[in-house]
Amino acid sequence: QLGLEGIISKKLSGLYRPGDRRDWTKSKCRPRQEFVICGYTPPKSSLPAFSSLVLGTYENGKLVSRGKVGTGFSEKARGDYLAMFKPLKTSKAHFEIEEEVMWLKPKLVAEVEFAEITRDGSVRQASFIAMREDKDPDQVHMDAVQKASVDGKGSKVSGITISSPDRMVFPADGVTKLEVAKYYERVGELMLPFVANRPLAILRAPGGITSELFFQKSFTTHLPEHVHQTQLPDGDQVFHVKDVSGLVSLAQFGAIEVHPWGAPLRNVEKPDFLTWDLDPDDSVPWIEVLGAAVLLRDFLAERGLQTVVKTSGGKGLHILLHLKPKHDWTVMKPFAKAVASAVAAFNPRRFTVTSTKSKRKGKIYIDWMRNGRGATCVAPWGLRARQGAGISMPLNWDQLPNLAKSGFNIHEPAETPEEWSEMAPHFIPASLLKSLGIVT
């Protein structure tokens, strides 16, 4: 927890002699965790039986890759385990991995020690400890691994001192303030293209998500480290970050959710992103929410506009359109509404564009109102201040059919989907604006 490498010990009667430490013992402090054995890789060179075990954990009901472990086995143990694996072989791959794997039914659990968890959620420098026959594979989830430097005042993450690092932010999920800060450090580089140098709002939970929450768009007194505040021409005060340290600093300030504007700071009047939020009533089947996302995607694609999709981190989906910043909000907000209305017209019994709660019963609300000056939406990879520690996860469109309603949480591996990395800005043609009644 202190981020120390280990303990050096000697016999109580032993003397301290500089340079002569043959009778000293170094004991490394390394985290341990149970993992589901998902398969194994074929043996290489002189290794008998198998090369390494392929590990995973269950997150939101699905197996997530956690890397491999190839050390810690005796030659006899490798042979014994290979015999144990034989009746568990399956042709079903549990997740994608870039090498040959002999997949196993997820029935066995291994205890593994390791140095750390990498940004993609895999173990580094892992060593096998033992099989855990007392553990149910379905109950194996990723524990948070705390690794930070300590300066006497608190733990440091990306150079930011985290006060009260052990404070529970998500009590039901066992997620602390330090883990929130470490999460934003881990995904920060992925988030920056969508949050850096644009006005932000944050949802703060200084006492955890079960206490009072604060939605904040500016700072009147204390400005956190690496956070910058600017006055817009109309007098509005807005803040922004430039780097990962800024995101971590917001987490230190109690921020859980990070909400960017749809326009960059250099040109706040002209959006470069539009977002449609599909917010279903609790009674709407999840399959229909997925279908609504595809319907909206296809409506825009037929007009030459390619979108990307992400989970909301709650019960819905967000569809984003990247724009060349040509038109201002007075054009783009009505455009967002017109698109939502056109899609809703395909099935008025299932869709609505009205925010009134009483008119949303049994329907999917296509929320277009996040597309206005000063309006915000939770950032890609952003945490949500809700039980479960969910995140707004970017996806490729072909992932949608298999997407579970439970979505993703803070323990998920972080990566940029191909469609997001290849996203290009679009120009909205005047002919489309005219056809939707936005301009004459």
Image (cartoon, rainbow, N blue to C red):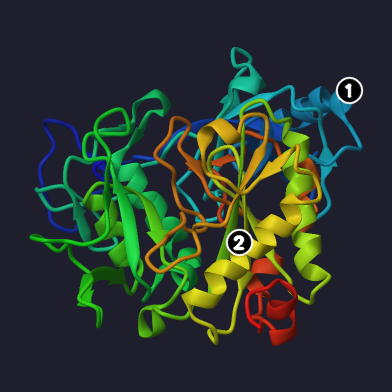
Element under disc 2: helix
Question: What's the residue type where badge 2 is placed?
Answer: Lys
Other residues around mark 1 within 10 Å, as few (<14) / some (14–19) / many (≥20)? few
Query: Of 283 and 123, which appears nearest the observer?
Result: 283
Q: Quadrant of residue 362?
A: top right
Query: Of 13 and 318, which appears nearest the observer?
Result: 318
Q: Which of the two labelled residues, at mark 1 and mark 2, occupies the earlier sequence position? A: 1
Q: Residue at x 60, y 61 (%)?
A: 337
Q: Is residue 202 left or right of residue 111?
A: left
Residue 105 is situated, as x and y percent measured from the top left of the image, at 81, 28
Residue 26 is situated, as x and y percent measured from the top left of the image, at 30, 43
Residue 337, disc: 2
Other residues around mark 2 within 10 Å, as few (<14) / some (14–19) / many (≥20)? many
Q: Residue at x 54, y 31 (%)?
A: 358
Residue 126 is situated, as x and y percent measured from the top left of the image, at 54, 44
Q: Is residue 318 above or below residue 210?
A: below
Question: What's the residue type where badge 1 is placed?
Answer: Pro
Residue denoted by label 1 = 87
Q: Residue furthest right?
A: 91
Residue 170 is situated, as x and y percent measured from the top left of the image, at 36, 32
Quadrant of the snapshot with the C terminus: bottom right
Q: Residue at x 46, y 33 (%)?
A: 143
